[in-house]
Image (spheres, grey):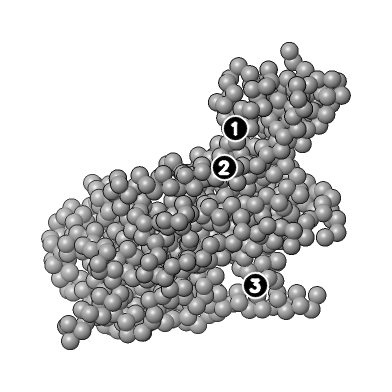
C-alpha cells in the first residue's frame, strides 16, 4: 500500500527535474501538496487538464514540482492570471495556490473579486500566519499579540478570518483544514475541486523557521502537535462556548451553496450574442 | 468596406477584432473606456471573451492568463492604469507571453487631466517596469493608423512573443475621422506558431531553429512551467549564469535582430532639406501641417513621422538628421523622445518644442521653431 501510494505520488511530481524542493525541512507546504495530489488522484483527472497557478512566497514555489500546466505569477496576482486562463479554457481545472500574505494582503482585492464572480477556480490558501520567504514579517493572519520580525513589540493588527472573508465575498464553497489532519485536508480539497464555482480551502500550516522561532513555539513537530491539540471539527465546535473556542482552529466545510459559475454564465452570453449576430 | 465616420478608440476595436483578438480584460478609465465598452458587446458576438476586472493590475494579469490559454488578448487603459500594469508587463516580457496593451495617453502625472491629450508616457512605455527588458511600442497619429497599428501590434506580439504597447493619445482616441478600413482579406494577420515537436521534446524557452520558440497553449498536452523568475529552457527557475546569459541574449536578440521588420516610419524628405521635423502620435499631424506651411515659405524642410517608437528607429533618424543643420522634435511632454533623438544626432542640433498642459501643439508653434535661425 505504501509503495502504491508513493508511486501514485510520483506520477504527479516533476521528480527528475526539480527536487529537492526549496522548503525548510519540516515545512507544512509539502503536506498540502501531497493532499492536493491525493485528491486529484482520487478524482482521476488527467494532468493535461489541470492548471496550477501560484503567486509569490514559499507557497508560490509549489507548481514547480507539480507535473501540470503550471504558472508561477507575480505576488498576489495568481487569481487574476487564473481568471484569464479559466475564461478561455473553461473546461480546465484551474487551481490557485496562495499564501496568506499573497492571497489576503497584496492579493486581497483579487481574492474577494474572484469570490464575487464565483469563477470556477479552486483556491488553496496556505496559512502559516507569517511572510516566511522574506524572513518572518507579520502578515494579515498573524495573531494579535504575536511577535514577528517587523512586529518586535507584538502585532497590534487583527488577523483576517479567511473563511468568513471568502463567504462574505461570495465564494460558494469554503472549508478549512490543518496540515496535521492531512487526510481530512485532502477530502476537503477534493470537495473543493469538484465544486462548480469559486471554492476556497484554508490550509492551516505553520512556519517553525520564522514564526515558531521568534514566538518560541518549538520545532515543526511541536507546532504540528499544537494543531492537533488546538483544533476542533465544526461539529464539535457547535457544542462549545465562545470561551472554550478561544484560540481554537475550527475545521470543516463552512459554506456550500449553488450559484451560476462565471464561465458557464458567460458561455450563455456568447450564445446569446452570437444568436443575435445571426439574426442581424 | 465603405467609408465611415469613426473614432480612434473604435478603430482600435475594429483592428483588434480583425487581428483575431478574442479576449479583453480591462478597468474603466478615461479616455480609453470606449474600447472596453465596444468590446464588451462585440467580443461575445464572435465567440470571444470580455471581462471587467477589479483593477488594472488584474486586467493585465488576466490578459496574460488568457494568452497562455492560446487566445490573442489585450487590455486598454490610460496613464494611472498604465502605471498599475507595469508589474505584469514585466512578467509578460520575462515569460515571453504575447499581449497587447493600449494606453490612450492623457495628461499626467497622477490623475492629471483625464480628458486632455499628452505624450507623457513615452519613457514609461519603454522603462516602466523594473529591470532590463525588451519591448515594442507603436504610436498612431490618425484613426486609420489606430486600426492598422492595432493589427500590427497583435502581429508583432504573436510573432515575437512579446508584450506590445500601442501608445495612443486622447486626441487620436477620441477624434472622429472619415476612414475606409481595408477589407479583412487585405490584412496580413500573424498567428502564433504552434509547437512543432511532441511534448517530450518541447522546450518553451529554447528552440534551435528560431530565436522565438513556439508557445504551446495550456491544456493541450504540453505541460510546462512559466515563471517570472529567471528560468532555464524548460521554464524552471535558475540562478545559473550560463543559463541566464543566453536567455538575455536571445530575448533582446529576438527584437534587435529583426528591426527591419519591427520598425516603421514615414519619411517625406526632399533632397537638400536643411531642417528635419521628427514627430509621432497626434503631434505628427500638426508637424506635417507645419512642414507644409514652411515649404510654402520656401524653407527646405524634411519630415519624419515615427510609427514604431520603441525600439527607437536610430538609423533612419541618423541618416536624415545627418543631412540637416537642425532637428525639431515637437512632443506633448517636456522632452522624452527628444532624448533619444539627441542621443542619436547630438544635443546641439536638436530643438525641442514641448507642451504638457493638456493643449495640442499647433502647426504655428512648430513653424516658429523651423523659422528660427
Instruction: Quote the CA–CA distance across marks 3 and 1.
Output: 43 Å
As drawn, the residue found furthest toward the front would be B209
**Viewer-side residue, A191 vs A85:** A85
Q: Of the numbered discs in the image, which one, if any, rests on residue B47? A: 3
Position of the C terminus of chain A, as image quadrant, is bottom right
The residue at which mark 2 appears reads as B259
Q: Nearer the viewer, mark 3 or mark 1?
A: 1
Chain that bears disc 2: B
Q: Are marks 1 and 2 in contact (CB under 8 Å)?
A: yes
Chain that bears disc 3: B
In percent of width and height, residue B347 lies at 58, 20
In percent of width and height, residue A90 lies at 52, 75
Same chain for the residues at labels 2 and 3, yes or no?
yes
Residue name at image x 44 percent, y 41 percent: B132
Label 1, residues with CA under 10 Å away: few <14, some 14-19, many ≥20:
few
Instruction: Quote the CA–CA distance across marks 2 and 3.
Output: 35 Å
Q: Check the image and report above or below for A147 versus B215.
A: above
Residue name at image x 72 percent, y 22 percent: B275
Q: Nearer the viewer, mark 2 or mark 3?
A: 2
**Viewer-side residue, A148 vs A2:** A2
Quarter of the view holding residue B117 = top right
As drawn, the residue found furthest toward the bottom would be A1
As drawn, the residue found furthest toward the top would be B373
Question: In terms of secondary structure, where does tag 3 sit?
Answer: loop
Amino acid at each position: 500500500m505504501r509503495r502504491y501510494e508513493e508511486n501514485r505520488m510520483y506520477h504527479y511530481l516533476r521528480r527528475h527535474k526539480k527536487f529537492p524542493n526549496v522548503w525548510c525541512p519540516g515545512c507544512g507546504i509539502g503536506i498540502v501538496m501531497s493532499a492536493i495530489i491525493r485528491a486529484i488522484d482520487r478524482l482521476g483527472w488527467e494532468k493535461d487538464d489541470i492548471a496550477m497557478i501560484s503567486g509569490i512566497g514559499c507557497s508560490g514555489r509549489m507548481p514547480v514540482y507539480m507535473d501540470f500546466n503550471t504558472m508561477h505569477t507575480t505576488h498576489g496576482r495568481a487569481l487574476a492570471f487564473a481568471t484569464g486562463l479559466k475564461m478561455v479554457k473553461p473546461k480546465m481545472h484551474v487551481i490557485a495556490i496562495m499564501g496568506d500574505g499573497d492571497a489576503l494582503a497584496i492579493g486581497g482585492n483579487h481574492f474577494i473579486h474572484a469570490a464575487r464572480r464565483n469563477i470556477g477556480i479552486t483556491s488553496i490558501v496556505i496559512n502559516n500566519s507569517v511572510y516566511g520567504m522574506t524572513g518572518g514579517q507579520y502578515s494579515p493572519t498573524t495573531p494579535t499579540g504575536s511577535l514577528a520580525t517587523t512586529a518586535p513589540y507584538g502585532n497590534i493588527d487583527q488577523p483576517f478570518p479567511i473563511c468568513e472573508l471568502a463567504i462574505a465575498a461570495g465564494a460558494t464553497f469554503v472549508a478549512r483544514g490543518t496540515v496535521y489532519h492531512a487526510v481530512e485536508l485532502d477530502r476537503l480539497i477534493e470537495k473543493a475541486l469538484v465544486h462548480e464555482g469559486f471554492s476556497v480551502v484554508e490550509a492551516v500550516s505553520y512556519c517553525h523557521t520564522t514564526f515558531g522561532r521568534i514566538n518560541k513555539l518549538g520545532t515543526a513537530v511541536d507546532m504540528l502537535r499544537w494543531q492537533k491539540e488546538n483544533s476542533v471539527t465544526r461539529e464539535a465546535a457547535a457544542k462549545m462556548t465562545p470561551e472554550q473556542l478561544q484560540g481554537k482552529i475550527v475545521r470543516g466545510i463552512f459554506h456550500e451553496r449553488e450559484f451560476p459559475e462565471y464561465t458557464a454564465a458567460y458561455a450563455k452570453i456568447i450564445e446569446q450574442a452570437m444568436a443575435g449576430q445571426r439574426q442581424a | 468596406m465603405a467609408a465611415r465616420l469613426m473614432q480612434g478608440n473604435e478603430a482600435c476595436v475594429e483592428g483588434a477584432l480583425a487581428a483575431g483578438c478574442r479576449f479583453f480584460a480591462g478597468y474603466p478609465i478615461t479616455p480609453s473606456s470606449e474600447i472596453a465598452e465596444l468590446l464588451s458587446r462585440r467580443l461575445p458576438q464572435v465567440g470571444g471573451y470580455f471581462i471587467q476586472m477589479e483593477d488594472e493590475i488584474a486586467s493585465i494579469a488576466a490578459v496574460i492568463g488568457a494568452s497562455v490559454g492560446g487566445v490573442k488578448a489585450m487590455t486598454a487603459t490610460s496613464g494611472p492604469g498604465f502605471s498599475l500594469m507595469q508589474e505584469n508587463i514585466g512578467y509578460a516580457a520575462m515569460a515571453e507571453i504575447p499581449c497587447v496593451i493600449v494606453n490612450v495617453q492623457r495628461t499626467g502625472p497622477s490623475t492629471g487631466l483625464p480628458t486632455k491629450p499628452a505624450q507623457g508616457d513615452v519613457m514609461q512605455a519603454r522603462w516602466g517596469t523594473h529591470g532590463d527588458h525588451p519591448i515594442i511600442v507603436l504610436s498612431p497619429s490618425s484613426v486609420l493608423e489606430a486600426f492598422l497599428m492595432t493589427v500590427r501590434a497583435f502581429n508583432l506580439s504573436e510573432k515575437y512573443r512579446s508584450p506590445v504597447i500601442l501608445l495612443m493619445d486622447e486626441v487620436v482616441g477620441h477624434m472622429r475621422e472619415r476612414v475606409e478600413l481595408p477589407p479583412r482579406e487585405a490584412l496580413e494577420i500573424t498567428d502564433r506558431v504552434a509547437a512543432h515537436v511532441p511534448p517530450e521534446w518541447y522546450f518553451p524557452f529554447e528552440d534551435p531553429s528560431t530565436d522565438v520558440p513556439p508557445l504551446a497553449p495550456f491544456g493541450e498536452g504540453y505541460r510546462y512551467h512559466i515563471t517570472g523568475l529567471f528560468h532555464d529552457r524548460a521554464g524552471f527557475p535558475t540562478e545559473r549564469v550560463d543559463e541566464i546569459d543566453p536567455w538575455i541574449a536571445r530575448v533582446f536578440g529576438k527584437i534587435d535582430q529583426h528591426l527591419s521588420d519591427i520598425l516603421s516610419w514615414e519619411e517625406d524628405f526632399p533632397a537638400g532639406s536643411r531642417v528635419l521635423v521628427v514627430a509621432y502620435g497626434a503631434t505628427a499631424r500638426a508637424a506635417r501641417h507645419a512642414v507644409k506651411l514652411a515649404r510654402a515659405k520656401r524653407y527646405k524642410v524634411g519630415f519624419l513621422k515615427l510609427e514604431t517608437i520603441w525600439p527607437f528607429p536610430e538609423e533612419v533618424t541618423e541618416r536624415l538628421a545627418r543631412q540637416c543643420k537642425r532637428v525639431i522634435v515637437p512632443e506633448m511632454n517636456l522632452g522624452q523622445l527628444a532624448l533619444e533623438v539627441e542621443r542619436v544626432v547630438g544635443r546641439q542640433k536638436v530643438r525641442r518644442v514641448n507642451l504638457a498642459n493638456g493643449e495640442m501643439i499647433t502647426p504655428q508653434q512648430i513653424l516658429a521653431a523651423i523659422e528660427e535661425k
